[in-house]
Image (cartoon, helix red, strand yellow):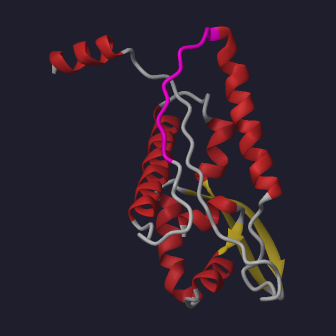
Amino acid sequence: MMELFAESPKTTKQVAELLRQPPTRLYHHVAALERAGLLVLTERRQNRGAVEKWYMGVAQQIQAGVRQKGDAARAARRAVAATALEQARQELLAIPPAAKEAALLTRLVVAAPSAQIPAIRRWLFDTVQRLRTEFALDDPTTSATEERRERWALTLAFAPVRPPAEAKRRRSRK
């Protein structure tokens, strides 16, 4: 569910259809995710006498709030990080042995002048936006005559890290 809400704003009914589940089975879970701060209500629309609630995963929303300070912002960042990293872990562990393409997995720590960090961050953000635009997920009910498309996930974190010596000192103090 989190992955589907993170792709773009959706209603509970739309997510239920994508998961081939009755919407009534998901309402409780959506409410719990909203209370936990992992989903955000982005819009209410009138539709045939009912009110549709559109939700977005905070992973989609967090980019705007990353610089916010305080306990709530820190908790939201932690929740997004935990959700995104756990989803990536599950996807990597579920790769079938006979997969046609191997997953690309890497960790890179860079050392750049402070003045260049905003430009690197912007380049990464723009690259993700281009991927999102060019390879947007289509409605899964599209015709079978179209070219078969595979779903691949990209999990990206660009965050400051402590130098190894500082991290070691902090661990030894505990």
* 84 on left or right of 61: left
Quadrant position of residue 7: bottom right
Q: What stretch is highlighted in magenta?
A: 105-114
Give the residue drawn at x 55%, y 68%.
100
Q: Quadrant of the C terminus?
A: top left
86 falls in the magenta region = no
Is 110 rendered above or below residue 6? above
| Spot occupied by residue 60 in the image (x, y as percentages of width and height) | 66, 51
| Spot occupied by residue 91 in the image (x, y as percentages of width and height) | 46, 62
Q: Quadrant of the N terminus?
A: bottom right
Q: Nearer the viewer, residue 5 or 127?
A: 127
Q: How many labels does the image show?
A: 0
Is 142 rendered above or below residue 42? below
Give the residue drawn at x 66%, y 82%.
13
* 54 on left or right of 172: right
Give the residue drawn at x 30%, y 11%.
165
107 falls in the magenta region = yes
Is 17 rendered above or below residue 162? below
Quadrant position of residue 168: top left
| Spot occupied by residue 104 in the image (x, y as percentages of width and height) | 53, 49
Q: Which SS type dominates the magenta stretch?
A: loop
Is 16 rendered above or below residue 6? below
| Spot occupied by residue 114 in the image (x, y as percentages of width and height) | 62, 10
